Amino acid sequence: MASRKGKNEDTIKQLIESRIKQRDNALEQKFSEMHNDIDPFIESLEKIGDREIVILSASLLDDYLEKLITASYIKDERVKSIFKDEHVLQSFYTKTNIAYFSGLIPKWLFNDLKLICEIRNRFAHRFLANLDLSDEAITARIEKCELRPKTMDGVKASRLKFTIVIIQAACTLKRIDATLTCNKPPNLMDITKLNEFDFDKMALTKDQIKEIITKSINPQS
């Protein structure tokens, strides 16, 4: 009896260790994919102007938010359609709100993403030739970001600070996405199995329907 119990415990231990290894491998793969996205972004920064950096940065974070939100949804091909054209989750600002109010990102990251969105909109909608990251209104927003390099507070290096904020925001989103993908909890439909519910079992019989009709016509009966 004791021998069988010991074997069962060994089997459970091996199963747990196997699951942990699978999760760690999946996380490592996700982090490897992250470098494939961020490394080209970093390499391109020296070749482009401030406006291009801001637009490209917002696009990178937009993609990461979309992947994170999609990972938290049910598996359905139609999920992709809600991010296209004029659908509800098309904009960077909307995705930021959905991610936060769905409990997918912390408040400090939510606040930083909103500031990045404001910076992005300023560049996208104000076509001033001399507008750059040293603009007073833009610098003020960068200095409010939690992900800014605080050891550089007081130093005028808005472009570098903004770049660091973007890289850290992207890494944080990717880490959350990797963790969610590898440890996704079951959704409510999986728990309740409502998609598999047999409503025919709830259907009224002919006699029950007849009784209801009779009582509605003659309540005193």
Image (tube, rainbow, N blue to C red):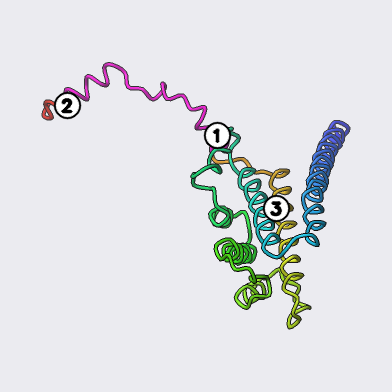
Q: Amino acid at mark 1?
A: Arg
Q: Is residue 114 left or right of residue 157?
A: left
Query: Where residue 220 appears, x then y in whole percent?
Result: 11, 29
Q: Position of residue 186 (x, y in %)?
A: 62, 40
Q: Residue furthest front?
A: 129
Q: CA distance from mark 2 to mark 1?
A: 45 Å
* Label pair 1/3, CB-CB below 8 angstroms: no
Q: Amino acid at mark 3?
A: Ile
Earlier sequence position, callout 1 versus callout 3: 1
Q: Amino acid at mark 2?
A: Lys
Residue 116, image x and y in percent?
A: 63, 64
Above/below status of 120 relative to 60: below
* Of the two numbered discs 3 and 2 in the rendering, the one whose residue sits closer to the viewer: 3
Q: Residue furthest right?
A: 3
Secondary structure under the numbered disc 3 in the rendered image: helix
Mark closer to the chain start, 2 or 1: 1
Helix, strand or loop at mark 1: helix
- Residue that mark 3 sits on: 176
- The residue to which callout 2 is attached is 215
- What is the quadrant of the C terminus in the image? top left
Badge nearest the viewer, 1 or 3: 1
Q: Which residue is mark 1?
A: 78
Q: Residue at x 16, y 28 (%)?
A: 216
Q: What predominant SS class does the magenta segment belong to?
A: helix
The range drawn in magenta is 189-214
Tell which of 190 and 39 is nearer to you.
Answer: 39
Q: Residue at x 85, y 31 (%)?
A: 4
Q: Is residue 211 magenta?
A: yes
Q: Residue at x 64, y 63 (%)?
A: 109
- Between 22 and 148, the one lying in front of the other is 148
Q: Residues within 10 Å of mark 1 (few under 14, many from 20)?
A: few
